[in-house]
Image: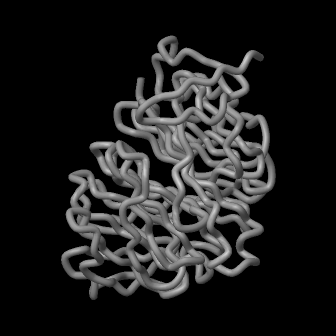
Amino acid sequence: MKTTRTKQTSFMLIGLFSSFYSLSSISAPTVYIPLGSGNGIAAVDAATDKVIEHFTGVKNPHGLVATQDGEYLLAGSINEDAEKTKAGEENNSSLFLVHPAHGHVMQTIPVAGWSHHQAITPDGRYVLSTHPTRNHVSVVDVQRGSQIKLIPTNNGPYYILVTRDGKRAYVSNSGASTVQEINTENWTVTRTINAGPSPEHMVLSKDENVLYVNNSRKGTLSLIPLNAPEDRQEVSIAESLHGLDISDDGKHLFISSKSEGKLIVFTPETGDKVTVPLSPNPYHLNTIPGTGKVYVSSRSEPTVWVIDQSSFKLINSFQLPAGEGHQMSIINQ
């Protein structure tokens, strides 16, 4: 394939994806899945559950977010070998600014260390990235293409999300059993909330009054009322919890258990649990709004299972081009 190079005022083109796909032909949501050790990103048509493009040129992407207008993807690179090094030696980590319509890596943005998960403000202006070995969250200004702030956190910042109004962010600290609230107007931690042991993936209730948090190593789910976090409840779910998301109607939570090889559907209102066997090692997951589907990746192989949000049944599966699926991002066409 012919590779071209151009210079731009605001962005520097540093790479070209191995292939090209025109998103104008897609009418259903497109799910972008970072492939981790596969060193790329897969684009999946949510209507057909088929991989429509395989982008390469992004090293070990784990976290992935999209701007609301669908113009850009931002992928965090997680170098798993870096876990064995000192934090001070990690000085070459970056976020990749990706143009999904043209298959270009537009820019690499240096950040404080290897990036685990990302969140993006609703206006698409800022990306927040967790750096577990640095005990910080970085704030990247997408328009400027640079890191503008480094926010100190408790030990082991893991997962991060932003409220719909963009005014608050929440970061789970897996090494400190806490969740911290961040004011996005001045990028400061406003309060620290006690969570269960080893808190990791999180999701907000549809009214954003309750924060649900997976406590991975203990196998419990924390239900934290944000107006009264001292009233936190803990529910036993399964061992080795990982992925977590909420149904379109807000009634059910989907939770993966890697070691037990299953998806658990938990209904907070009733306490009911339904188990869906999935093997091997169900990992990251996302509900796909407007489709009635849940995508669940495998940690062990390039497989994604498709679950029906209403019946909780396995309705399909598909293979990724390489690697394993991590933090998925959705662009509505």
Q: Position of residue 285 (x, y in %)?
A: 57, 51
Quarter of the image for residue 172 reads: bottom left
* Nearer-the-camera pick, 157 or 143: 143
Residue depicted at 73% across the width and 45% down the height: 39
Report if residue 294 is visible in the image. no
Numbered circles on residues, count:
0
The quadrant holding residue 218 is: bottom right
Q: Is residue 283 left or right of residue 151?
A: right
Residue 277, how many percent across, how many down? 70, 55
Q: Residue at x 58, y 43 (%)?
A: 295
Residue 72, x across and y down, in percent: 46, 35
Q: Can you give x and y, in whole percent of width and height, for residue 265 in the image?
A: 52, 58
73, above or below 243, in the image: above
Give the residue displayed 55% in from the left and 51% down from the top: 95
Residue at the spot 79% in from the left edge and 40% down from the top edge? 322
Colour basis = one colour
Image position of 246 with respect to 291: above or below: below
Along the viewing direction, whichever of 220 and 208 lies nearer the viewer? 208
> In the image, is 154 to the left or to the right of 298?
left
Quarter of the picture holding the C terminus: top left
